[in-house]
């Protein structure tokens, strides 16, 4: 795509010079409104020096997503080099799993584009309509046998359907992680199909369950049951999965169960079901991993209030000597704020045992990319 020229204000130039990948709408002049969504821009300063190139976003708080800095315009060679560098950073992880996030958006230099590999199938997704074209370019540059493209959700109009870029992507994909097989619902699953970013939590569960005496596990917001599969294989005696998606629970039962007698499925809204759970129901390990709850800063106080109610209810069903896992994938909730909120809610009986770091294929290249927080609390 041929870039068009746009002159930045001084404050926007300073942002690029600091290395941040976003320019916000309030930092643009009204001249930017002539650009179409997804237009590639050649960004210049007040002296007409080219300082970088970016993608224009017609809606939302983020107005320009940076492609690259410097005067050279991004081209096919730039894309190949950027993609190859991202793949090389995953080479060590690839020794242990073929379920890998190959591209993680701005943190890998490809704004608003993610690529998840599940065995011989890759799912390319853009989380901003302006980056749909870049996502297509990335998809065609991949060497994976099967490539599926998921365009970004539009603010207006019906969602665009997924399309095949190469091969024959299956309805259900498969991958192996540290020797454990998993299935992915490519046809109806969330986002790219499943959550590879929870790999660190799956490793933690494997170790923690093995150290326990056949614990009873409560898996809230269980989705497709991958955490339950890990818990069963590690020795859990019972896993109770709770999710509001009947399809996700059915997928879990069909693909992530060894011994069906160890699994119980509850189709319910966790926020309504958990406070009504009988007080005598206790679990040795409670997993609380709600979905993202807002993308708007103004709604953060309400989200924190919901978290407090959720974790207050969860703590009442965590056995003494057990573990409560608190997770948050709402990017607008900062790590320190989430941690302090949960610590204050749980009180002194719960001590933080582990703060599970982001996985290497989900690098945190700038502050806003630090979206996933996973805290494991030991109960006294």
Image (spheres, rainbow, N blue to C red):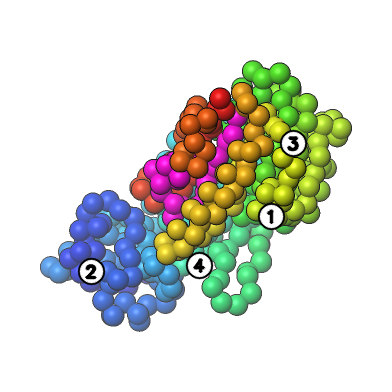
**Left or right of 17: which side holds 182?**
right
- Residue 368 point in image, percent of width and height: 39, 51
- Total number of numbered discs in the rendering: 4
The residue to which callout 1 is attached is: 272
Q: Position of residue 113 (x, y in %)?
A: 49, 55
How far apart in space, not on screen, are marks 1 and 3 (Cα)? 18 Å
List the single residue furthest toward the right.
261
Q: CA distance from mark 2 to mark 1?
A: 49 Å
Q: Residues within 10 Å of mark 1 (few under 14, many from 20)?
A: few
Classify mark 3: residues with Cα within 10 Å, few (<14), some (14-19) or many (20+): few
Pointer 4 residue: 129
First along the sequence among labels 3 and 4: 4
The numbered mark at residue 280 is: 3
218 on left or right of 65? right
**Among numbered discs 3 and 2, the one appearing first in the sequence:** 2
Res 162 → quadrant: bottom right
Mark 2 or mark 1, which is nearer to you?
A: 1
Q: Which residues are magenta?
A: 323-342
């Amino acid at each position: 795509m041929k870039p068009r020229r746009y002159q930045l204000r001084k404050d926007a130039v300073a942002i690029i010079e600091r290395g941040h990948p976003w320019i916000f709408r309030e930092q643009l002049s009204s001249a930017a409104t002539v650009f179409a969504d997804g237009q590639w821009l050649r960004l210049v300063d007040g002296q007409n020096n080219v300082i970088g190139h970016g993608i224009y976003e017609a809606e939302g708080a983020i107005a320009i997503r940076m492609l690259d800095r410097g005067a050279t315009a991004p081209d096919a060679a730039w894309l190949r080099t950027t993609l190859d560098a991202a793949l090389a950073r995953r080479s060590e992880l690839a020794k242990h799993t073929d379920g890998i996030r190959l591209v993680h958006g701005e943190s890998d230099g490809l704004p608003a584009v993610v690529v998840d590999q599940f065995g011989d199938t890759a799912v390319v997704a853009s989380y901003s309509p302006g980056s749909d074209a870049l996502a297509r370019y990335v998809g065609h540059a991949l060497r994976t046998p099967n490539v599926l493209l998921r365009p970004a959700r539009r603010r207006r109009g019906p969602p665009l359907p997924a399309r095949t870029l190469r091969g024959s992507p299956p309805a259900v994909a498969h991958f192996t992680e540290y020797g454990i097989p998993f299935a992915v619902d490519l046809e109806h699953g969330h986002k790219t199909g499943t959550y590879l970013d929870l790999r660190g939590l799956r490793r933690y569960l494997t170790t923690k369950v093995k150290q326990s005496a056949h614990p009873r596990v409560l898996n809230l917001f269980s989705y497709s049951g991958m955490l339950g599969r890990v818990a069963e294989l590690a020795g859990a005696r019972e896993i109770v999965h709770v999710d509001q998606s009947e399809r996700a629970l059915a997928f879990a039962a069909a693909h992530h169960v060894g011994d069906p007698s160890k699994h119980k499925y509850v189709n319910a809204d966790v926020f309504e079901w958990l406070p009504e759970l009988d007080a005598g129901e206790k679990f040795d390990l409670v997993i609380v991993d709600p979905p993202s709850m807002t993308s708007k800063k103004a709604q953060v106080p309400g989200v924190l209030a919901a978290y407090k109610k959720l974790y207050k209810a969860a703590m009442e069903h965590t056995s003494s000597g057990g573990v409560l896992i608190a997770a948050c994938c709402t990017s607008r909730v900062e790590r320190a704020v989430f941690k302090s909120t949960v610590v204050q809610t749980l009180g002194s009986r719960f001590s933080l045992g582990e703060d599970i770091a982001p996985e290497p294929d989900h690098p945190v290249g700038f502050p806003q990319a630090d979206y996933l927080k996973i805290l494991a609390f030991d109960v006294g």
